[in-house]
């Protein structure tokens, strides 16, 4: 009886570890992170074209974006942008359009 319960606990633990490993492997990988502070875009992690950072800073200044984060996530063979902070929808689209031009030069 006790042995059967231990077997079930071990199987549940193994299944949990397998699921955790799959979740970790399937989540998007962060390629780069850019921070926006006082309208300035600064590289904080990863590799990103300098031209993209400079042009993104121009968009942030023009759209009066003073804080936030831009993250490049690997999705399959491409890199997509994710945003956090008070970055409006139109500005996000402008940054995505810029990434389609500048990011493809990598």
Image (tube, helix red, strand yellow):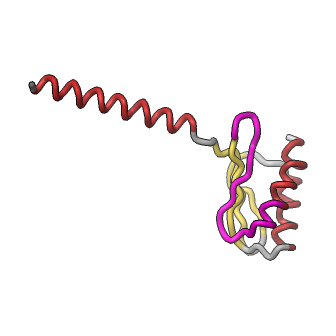
Residue drawn at the location 42% of the way across and 30% of the way down: 18
Q: Quadrant of residue 38?
A: bottom right
**Percent of width and height locating residue 50:** 85, 52
Describe residue 27's horizontal placement relative to residue 43 as left or right.
Answer: left
Describe residue 84's horizontal placement relative to residue 90 as left or right.
Answer: left
**Percent of width and height locating residue 101:** 90, 49
Residue drawn at the location 44% of the way across and 37% of the way down: 20
Describe residue 31's horizontal placement relative to residue 23 as left or right.
Answer: right
| Stretch of the chain drawn in magenta | 75-93
The image quadrant where one finds the N terminus is: top left
Describe residue 22's horizontal placement relative to residue 85 as left or right.
Answer: left
Assess whether residue 81 is covered by the magenta stretch: yes
Q: Quadrant of residue 104?
A: top right
Q: Taking 7 as reference, is 73 above or below it?
A: below
Q: Quadrant of residue 98?
A: bottom right
Q: Taking 42 as reference, is 79 above or below it?
A: above
Residue drawn at the location 87% of the way across and 67% of the way down: 58
**Percent of width and height locating residue 61:** 84, 73
Q: Residue furthest left?
A: 1
The image quadrant where one finds the C terminus is: top right
Assess whether residue 1 is covered by the magenta stretch: no
Residue drawn at the location 87% of the way across and 73% of the way down: 62
């Amino acid at each position: 009886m006790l042995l059967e319960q231990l077997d079930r606990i071990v199987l549940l633990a193994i299944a949990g570890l397998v699921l955790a490993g799959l979740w970790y492997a399937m989540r998007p990988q962060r390629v780069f992170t850019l921070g926006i502070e006082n309208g300035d875009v600064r590289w904080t992690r990863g590799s990103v074209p300098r031209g993209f950072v400079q042009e993104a800073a121009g968009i942030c200044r023009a759209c009066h974006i003073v804080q936030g984060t831009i993250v490049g996530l690997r999705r399959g063979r491409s890199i997509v942008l994710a945003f956090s902070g008070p970055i409006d929808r139109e500005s996000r689209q402008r940054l995505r359009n810029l990434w389609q031009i500048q990011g493809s030069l990598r």
